Amino acid sequence: MAIIGAGIAGLALAIGLRKQNVSYKIYEAALQFDAVGVGSGMGPNALRAMELMDADFAKMYDKIKVGNACRDRLHEQFEILKGFGAVDGWRGGSVSHPNFERSSAHRKALLEVMSTLIPEGTVEFSKQVVRVDQHVEGKKQVYLTFSDGNTLAVDAVVGCDGIKRIIRGVVLEGGYPEQIVATYCNTYVYRCIVPMQEAKQILGSYAEEANVVVFIRDERPWGREQAAIQVSRDEMLSDFDGFDQRLIELLNNTKPVRWPLFHHPYTSTYYRGHICLLGDSAHASSPSQAAGAGLGLEDALVLSRHLALGAAQAVVQESQEVLLAYFLDHPEFGHDIQKVTDYANRRLPLIWLHDLEADVKAAENRFRELTGEQQ
């Protein structure tokens, strides 16, 4: 089996397959593990997926994770504030759950941990897939062609190559070509790291640094593929006309770069023949529910157990609705902070507390139906 992509989803699948004694190899287009990125939040669902895949995975994550520093707010995901704290103070609507404990890890640290759980030499770097063929001359194998001209025949391919890579196109081009390209979420972000010494008057003094991400609603088409764009500082500041001056000062460390958010709102099938999708290549989502990495781990758990489909499309579409709510632009909740908070507190536990063991069992039953295998 070939796993295309050595990100979080691809490595998670490899960890799960190794525990199930399924042979595989990972092919990654980059020169090395991609450490670019910020923290990946993990809810209870993601932590259970780790534990069910490999107990050592969960233990190692526990050593690198960080959470809320304030002990009486460990179970809080975030607060919803109006007017940057100037309207009702810093205590806003709290999105939390007693069975949720906020945790996250930097992408670099997480990939380093995950890479230690698979055998050395499992990943081949600088292997970009440029063509995929199957059912050649009646054979059941999948044939991969790489940018270096090398070819490979494998029994199956799992595309973990992200939101805009080739495997998604191979799966969808026959029946759903309009779903291949990701859709703009009508949102871009500015982001920066601010030393807490500079930010503590606004954000409190609970950490050494503050990761600041500002989401800007944008009704215009992006029209620049999926690439970030550099703008002038004046252009960036024009997005904040009328905003609290403290927020604008907080952005002094921000590079004027607009990072667009894209997602896959519709994916009618996750497989074609002996090729399937996993993680962002299957269901890339906006970050409004902090669920993307966790969904990839859930996919990896189910697929590593039974080589069956994961089902996560609803979360992608709901994440876009949640994004509207956070912009105070939801048609039902509008600017009512309490309604938005109540909505988030209903919505997120459905992700956090999802029954993964039931998913594995359902996949097992479906596998037996399709293969006629007796239990």
Image (cartoon, rainbow, N blue to C red):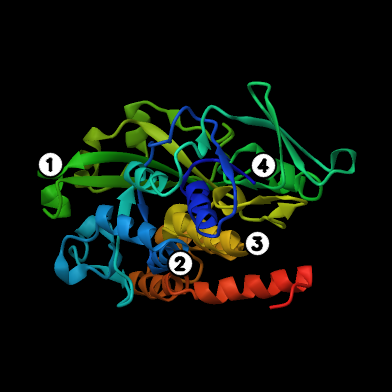
Q: Name the mark nearer the viewer: 1 or 4.
A: 4
Tell me which numbered mark, 4 or 3, is placed earlier along the sequence. Answer: 4
Q: Position of residue 215 (x, y in %)?
A: 39, 48
x then y, percent, for residue 226: 54, 36
Q: Nearer the viewer, residue 369 or 208?
A: 369
Task: Tell me if mark 3 has few (under 14), some (14-19) or many (20+) residues whose alpha carbon lies within 10 angstroms of its own.
Answer: some
Q: What kind of residue is marked 3?
A: Leu
Does label 3 or label 2 sit earlier along the sequence?
Answer: 2
Query: Do tag 1 and tag 3 residues touch (Cβ < 8 Å)?
Result: no
Closer-to-camera residue (373/265): 373
- The answer for how far apart the CA atoms under marks 2 and 1 are is 42 Å
Residue located 54% across and 35% down the image = 28
Q: Is residue 318 visible?
A: yes
User: How far apart are the alpha carbons under marks 3 and 2?
Assistant: 17 Å
Label 1, label 3: how far apart the Cα atoms are: 47 Å
Q: Which residue is mark 2?
A: 52
Q: Nearer the viewer, mark 3 or mark 2?
A: 2
Which of the 4 quarters of the picture holds residue 83?
bottom left
The residue labelled by disc 3 is 309
Q: Amino acid at mark 4?
A: Ile
In the image, what residue occupies the spot 21% across and 47% down? Answer: 210
**Label 4: few (<14), some (14–19) or many (≥20) C-alpha neighbours in 10 Å:** many
x%, y% of residue 315?
54, 63
Q: Earlier in the sequence, mark 4 or mark 2?
A: 2
Residue 125: image location, x then y, percent: 51, 30
Q: From what the image shows, is residue 176 above or below residue 33?
A: below
N-term-proximal mark, 1 vs 4: 4
Disc 1 is placed on an element classified as helix
Task: Name the mark on residue 167.
Answer: 4
Closer to the N terminus: mark 1 or mark 3? 1
The disc placed on residue 198 is 1
